[in-house]
């Protein structure tokens, strides 16, 4: 083992000597030992003598090296456009200067805080601040970066929980991607799109039968708080397992406990692997809630332009509109109806227009959007609600009265509509669900009048009995999406009268036992629907239902 002498002006600690010994042994490729000698002439640093070779790590040697190289030093020219903070507060800063700044450009403050330019005025710019802005003060320098607001994109984000800037907040380390996209881009033009004609099944009977959703569609989910909106979106995400559909859940202004619950549900059902969760919780500043949907949509577009299908959920845009109203009022923009700025329609239209089904020349990818809007006392005429209704391709209205009476999902068939309609259904579903909406709507009307009279004609009684069974069949527990082939079979039994003699209280048990019967005794029925998208021979299907009913009665 070789020995060396360490010359130092001060006494070193044993752990410092051990570290230096290990470093030098690794560097020299052989084990050494080090003896320390005090040399008070050394000014900072130390010298190490090993095998007649002197390793000089002193400040004086560093200065000599600097002197010898300074004549060859070529200074770079850094030119930055800067401004001065005029005032700051509530997550908003106004700055002078920055005359060539661009809208949505990222700027950096001398404290290290970043912001995004939101207002471009004659004498100043308005900046929204991200993260902790307590270090930003009047008089601070603010510098342009030349970069438009962008977020990371790509496969590496799958299975992760990120904030509005695309930064991980799940404690699983950094996201390994170097690809980024600007969060604001122009939506695809008409010629880049094709018609929505491919079904995106949610696994929820009431939706897939009454208000079907197609890939590339924008279907609004609207209703009061606590009516099951998030549950519908979660079921839709869970139902995409194994279907090569990427899912993105954007939580805007939600409680962090709610987001955690969503993530845990996705994990339990092995759905997080194909899902990205973008969280801008209620505790985050308004700017983060404002940009969250655009960040999520940008991540979705990366997959869409790669020819993939994406389902994105915005939960919910009412809170994004409220955050934008807050920013706008702080930026001194004039308030309009319900104190929202005049461009609040554009806030959502430029987001939702990015949902599309691209033509085959561009890969045929799609983004299907499920935006949420929260109403107050079922008021569909509110400003933001009417805006988003006019932007989307239909709405699923959830009624609180139904929800509290145990009808879940609490979908109001009379107010819910899909403007894509049967084009987004397989042939088998179109055949069995054709009259279902009318039957359900007429039942709801008759139900009201039946409360006031006891003498009802047989036809009315029959409609009421059938309607009660439709309601029971359309009920569904949460986190239990049903494959479309099974939906077709139970709805066929319903509309063809096979459930008319089954007690209403037994409908739920009948349904789930029927699914088990099909799985175990007649899987060919389900396979035929999957492979052909059409009904099997109806006599065969009817015979299967009759056989099951015999067993069901026997078990009773």
Image (cartoon, grey):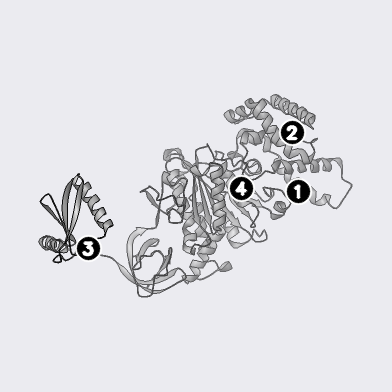
Q: Earlier in the sequence, mark 3 or mark 1?
A: 3
Residue depth check, mark 1 versus mark 4: number of the one nearer the observer: 4
Disc 4: which residue: 232
Which residue is pictured at 77% across the width and 27% down the height? 550
The residue carrying mark 1 is: 444
Upstream in the sequence, badge 1 or badge 4?
4
Q: How many residues crowd mark 4 within 10 Å: few (<14), some (14–19), many (20+)?
A: many
Residue toward you, 193 or 267:
267
Q: Disc 4 or 2, which lies upstream in sequence?
A: 4
Q: Which residue, given by chain and number where applicable, does mark 3 sit on?
A: 11
In terms of secondary structure, where does tag 4 sit? Answer: helix
Q: Are marks 3 and 1 in contact (CB under 8 Å)?
A: no
Earlier along the polypeptide chain: callout 1 or callout 2?
1
Q: CA distance from mark 1 to mark 4?
A: 22 Å
Q: CA distance from mark 1 to mark 2?
A: 20 Å
The one nearer the camera, 379 or 133, is 133
Observer-side mark, 3 or 4, equals 3
Question: Is 427 situated above or below 32?
Answer: above
Which mark sits nearer the N-terminus, 3 or 4? Answer: 3
| C-alpha distance separating marks 4 and 2 | 28 Å
Residue indicated by mark 2? 496
């Amino acid at each position: 083992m070789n020995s060396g002498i360490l010359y130092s002006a001060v006494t070193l600690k044993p752990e410092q000597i051990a570290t230096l010994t290990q470093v030098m042994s690794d560097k020299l490729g052989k084990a050494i030992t080090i003896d320390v000698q005090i040399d008070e002439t050394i000014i900072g640093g130390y010298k190490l003598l090993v095998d007649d070779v002197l390793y000089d790590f002193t400040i004086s040697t560093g200065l000599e090296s600097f002197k010898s190289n300074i004549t060859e030093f070529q200074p770079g020219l850094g030119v930055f456009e800067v401004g001065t903070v005029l005032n700051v507060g509530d997550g908003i800063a106004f700055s002078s200067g920055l005359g060539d700044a661009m809208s949505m450009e990222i700027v950096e403050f001398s404290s290290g805080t970043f912001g995004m330019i939101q207002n471009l005025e004659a004498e100043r710019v308005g900046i929204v601040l991200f993260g902790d802005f307590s270090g930003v003060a009047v008089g601070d320098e603010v510098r342009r970066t030349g970069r438009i607001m962008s977020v990371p994109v790509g496969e590496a984000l799958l299975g992760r929980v990120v904030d509005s800037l695309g930064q991980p907040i799940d404690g699983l380390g950094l996201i390994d991607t170097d690809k980024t996209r600007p969060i604001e881009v122009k939506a695809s033009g008409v010629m880049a799109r094709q018609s929505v004609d491919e079904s995106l099944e949610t696994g929820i009977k009431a939706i897939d039968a009454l208000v079907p959703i197609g890939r590339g569609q924008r279907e609004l989910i609207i209703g009061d708080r606590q009516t099951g909106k998030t549950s519908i979106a979660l079921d839709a995400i869970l139902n995409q397992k194994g279907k090569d559909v990427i899912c993105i859940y954007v939580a805007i202004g939600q409680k962090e406990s709610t987001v955690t619950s969503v993530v845990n549900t996705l994990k339990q059902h092995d759905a997080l692997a194909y899902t990205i969760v973008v969280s801008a919780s209620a505790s985050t500043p308004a700017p983060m809630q404002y940009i969250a949907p655009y960040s999520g949509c940008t991540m979705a577009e990366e997959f869409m332009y790669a020819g993939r299908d994406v389902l994105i959920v915005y939960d919910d845009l009412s809170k994004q509109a409220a955050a934008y109203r807050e920013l706008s009022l702080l930026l001194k923009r004039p308030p309009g109806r319900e104190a929202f700025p005049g461009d609040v329609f554009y806030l959502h239209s430029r987001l939702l227009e990015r949902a599309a089904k691209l033509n085959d020349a561009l890969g045929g990818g799609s983004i299907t959007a499920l935006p949420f809007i929260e109403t107050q006392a079922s008021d569909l005429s509110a400003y933001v609600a009417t805006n988003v209704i006019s932007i989307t391709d239909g709405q699923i209205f959830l009624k609180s009265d139904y929800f509290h009476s145990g009808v879940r999902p609490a979908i109001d068939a009379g107010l819910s509509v899909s403007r894509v309609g049967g084009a987004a259904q397989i042939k088998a579903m179109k055949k069995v669900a054709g009259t279902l909406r009318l039957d359900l709507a007429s039942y709801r009307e008759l139900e009201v009048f039946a409360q006031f009279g006891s003498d009802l004609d047989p036809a009315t009684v029959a409609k009421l009995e059938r309607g009660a069974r439709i309601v029971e069949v359309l009920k569904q527990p949460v986190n239990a999406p049903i494959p479309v082939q099974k939906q077709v079979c139970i709805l066929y039994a319903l509309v063809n009268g096979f459930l008319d003699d089954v007690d209403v209280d037994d409908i739920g048990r009948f349904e789930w036992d029927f699914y088990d019967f099909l799985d175990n005794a007649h899987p060919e029925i389900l396979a035929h629907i999957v492979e052909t998208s059409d009904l099997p021979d109806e006599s065969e299907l009817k015979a299967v239902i009759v056989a099951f009913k015999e067993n069901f009665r026997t078990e009773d």
